[in-house]
Image: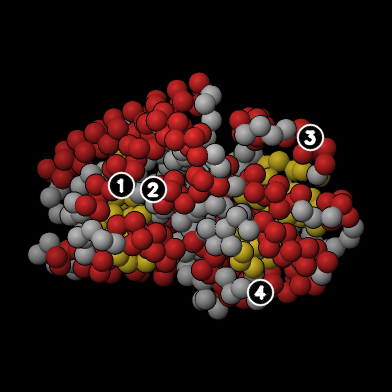
Amino acid sequence: MNILSVNGPMKRYAGSRTSVVEVAMIVAKHGIKTIILSSNRSSHLDGISNIFCGNSGNLSRVYLTSFSLKEIFDNWVSGFSYLFYLIRVERLIKKYKSGDCRAIVENNDIWSINQDILVVRSSFTYFYKSTRCKIIPFLAKRFLLSLFDFKSHLIMFVERSYFRNSRSKKIVVVSDFVKSNLLELYGKMSFDKRKLIVVYNGVNINIAKRELKRVRAFNDKNIVISFVGRNLLRKNILGLFEIMSKLSVNFKEKVLLRLIGNSEKEIGCFFEEHNCDFKQLKSIYNIEIIEPTEDIVDYFLSTHILLVPSIYDGFAKVVTEAMASGCCVVVSNGCGASEMIRNCKDGFVFDNFDYIRAAEIMCDLLNNPVLIDKCGSEARNAVLNGKVPSWDESAFKKVEIYRDVLEEKGELMS
């Protein structure tokens, strides 16, 4: 049995790539072969079959936030890239299925029009509608920007079309958070709500099982707070510094703020686009910048607190990886992975955009290093005790879904 997994750009360090590859490697033990269709060539895909469907350009799903000519130009270029990518993907699916009519087409995050299974990692429409008024507070500016925001309108049109004319046999979401987003947006449409199934991203249980050789002794200047994320708007690096600004001077001096996932140039450009001076922030805070890396988990060994102020994130696997590494996690409820946290026991959850509450939590933790260690230990034990799903559990649920889809198609899976 073959699964044709349809994807967009599978960036080497992206969580979406990890989730596709991890599950594909496990379901292979059940005799299910995954063929990944994406805009990446076969490199970095751990030996899994790959179909290259052409370069997709920059398809980062962010909306227009300024009248910069460069940002508007990039928006339109990436919008047309997305449109042409959809067309190329459809042709390749049709060509592939003509040779293997039994293959199940699994569409990972709306990179195809027709599929047997739709996997929704996040809703761009919900992100757009629920956060723009906070990011762009002026109504007139929001309205004018929307006139130029071709990419966002195209993505939202495609997303809406799926649920208006859905032929998917199953719709898999990565968290109850995403499920509630879809029901809020499309619940009145005619698609069968019973198709919606939650399959959480897993975590590598071996992270929690390894011997933790930490450098985490607390003194006045080595409490490490890590922030991870490539998409700086959704991951909300601006919110991170909003939270940090509310801490007292004493706390700012004792904290090392580790920013993982971008170069200093990329961060500087992002802040410049939002009329902020990153150089000034560097003079205020002790900042360490780590460029994109596959060794994120290793950095968690010297991290005391993972701060995730995401304004919208379907899951964010770094949360469960940090828990497995024994870190204390502080997460916005705009992130689906907050569902893995028992609030005030193995981590802390604060309301989206509530930076005052987030700062209060950080102050409590920085005042009480013992609480940081206790939460980290509880988080690691939650992973070890199966309270956080492993990749094996996620893959097993996927196998059950593939079996159900085959039965609906009138075929039988051995």
User: 10 Å neighbourhood of mark 3: few (<14), some, or many (≥20)?
Assistant: few
Mark 2 and mark 4 in contact? Answer it, CB < 8 Å: no
- Give 163 or 378, whichever is nearer the viewer: 163
Tell me the number on the disc at residue 344. Answer: 4
Instruction: Say whether residue 226 is visible.
Output: yes
Q: Type of residue at label 3? A: Gln
> Total number of numbered labels?
4
Q: Which residue is depicted at the point 15% across and 45% down?
A: 97
Asked which quadrant contains residue 50, the reply is top left
> Which residue position holds label 1?
159
Q: How is the image coloured?
A: secondary structure
Q: CA distance from mark 2 to mark 4?
A: 31 Å
Q: Position of residue 190 (x, y in %)?
A: 19, 60
Q: Type of residue at label 1? A: Glu
Q: Secondary structure at mark 2?
A: helix
Mark 2 and mark 1 in contact? Answer it, CB < 8 Å: yes
Q: Type of residue at label 2? A: Thr
Q: Quadrant of the C terminus?
A: bottom left
Q: Which tag is nearer the camera, tag 2 or tag 4? A: 2
Q: Which residue is depicted at the point 46% across and 32% down?
A: 145
Q: Position of residue 96 (x, y in %)?
A: 18, 42
Residue 8 falls left or right of residue 248: left
Tell me the number on the disc at residue 280. Answer: 3
